[in-house]
Every structure is written in structure tokens, then in C-alpha cells.
Image: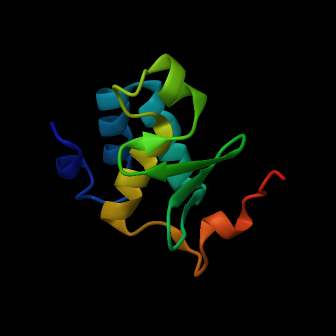
């Protein structure tokens, strides 16, 4: 089963079951991010609002789970949520660059 196959029905119980089956608890978490509207699309990046705001770009995420636990080898919940959100066009668009909101250390 591929991700493209499971998103065809939209945000549904079937999608929840498929994400849980494919990705376990990370799939469940990704589904929750989608339902709660936590995926944002800025001009430069996708951002998923969790405990913090996590930047997702291609198959990379700034969260510790992706970088430490998954060692860049498997998608975290934030990457999964963004991939589903892109296919379903289920994200809030922010007409600004996310980098403009980041604090720059001096």
C-alpha cells in the first residue's frame, strides 16, 4: 500500500486506519495534525505546529524524532502530515516567507 492510494477518500476513517497501519503511532499523530489544522504552507516551507513549530522541506524535518530516533531514514509524523496535506490540499496558506519569522541570533 502506498500513500497515494490511501488519500483518495480524503480525511476519513479509512485514511486514519491506513496511516496507522503504514506508520503506527506516527501515522496516528499525523492524522491528528491534519484534523486539527496544524499544517501551514508558507512561501518557502511547510510548517507543522506541534510542541514547537517544525519545518518540513522535501523529506526532511527539524524535529528530534526524525533526526535522532529515525536517523533521517523514515518519515516522522510531521513529514507524513505534510505529504498527506499536499495531496489533499489540506493546509493553511500563509502568504509570507517563514524565514522572516525566525529570530536571528546576533
Furthest-top residue in this view? 69
Q: Tell me how many marks there are.
A: 0
Residue 17 in the image, given as x and y percentages of width and height? 34, 36
Residue 4 in the image, given as x and y percentages of width and height? 20, 51
Residue depicted at 50% across the width and 43% down the height: 78
Q: Quadrant of the N terminus?
A: top left
Coloring applied to the structure: rainbow
In-image side of 36 versus 3 (left or right): right
Residue depicted at 51% across the width and 74% down the height: 43
Furthest-bottom residue in this view? 95
Residue 38 in the image, given as x and y percentages of width and height? 60, 56
In-image side of 43 versus 80 (left or right): right
Residue depicted at 50% across the width and 54% down the height: 34
Residue depicted at 29% across the width and 37% down the height: 18
In-image side of 17 versus 49 (left or right): left
Q: Is residue 100 above or below residue 38?
A: below
- Residue in the foreground of this view, choosing between 57 and 81: 57
- Residue in the foreground of this view, choosing between 85 and 67: 67
Q: Is residue 39 above or below residue 71?
A: below
**Picture quadrant of residue 96:** bottom right
In-image side of 6 versus 66 (left or right): left
Furthest-front residue in this view? 106
Q: Is residue 59 above or below residue 35?
A: above
Amino acid at each position: 500500500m502506498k500513500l497515494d492510494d490511501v488519500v483518495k477518500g480524503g480525511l476519513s476513517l479509512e485514511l486514519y486506519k491506513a496511516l496507522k497501519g503504514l506508520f503506527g503511532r506516527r501515522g496516528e499523530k499525523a492524522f491528528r495534525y491534519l484534523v486539527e489544522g496544524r499544517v501551514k504552507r508558507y512561501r518557502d516551507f511547510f510548517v507543522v505546529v506541534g510542541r514547537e513549530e517544525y519545518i518540513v522541506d522535501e523529506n526532511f524535518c527539524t524535529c528530534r524524532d526524525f533526526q535522532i530516533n529515525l536517523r533521517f531514514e523514515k518519515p516522522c509524523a510531521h513529514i507524513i502530515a505534510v505529504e498527506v496535506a499536499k495531496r489533499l490540499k489540506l493546509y493553511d496558506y500563509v502568504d509570507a516567507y517563514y524565514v522572516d519569522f525566525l529570530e536571528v541570533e546576533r
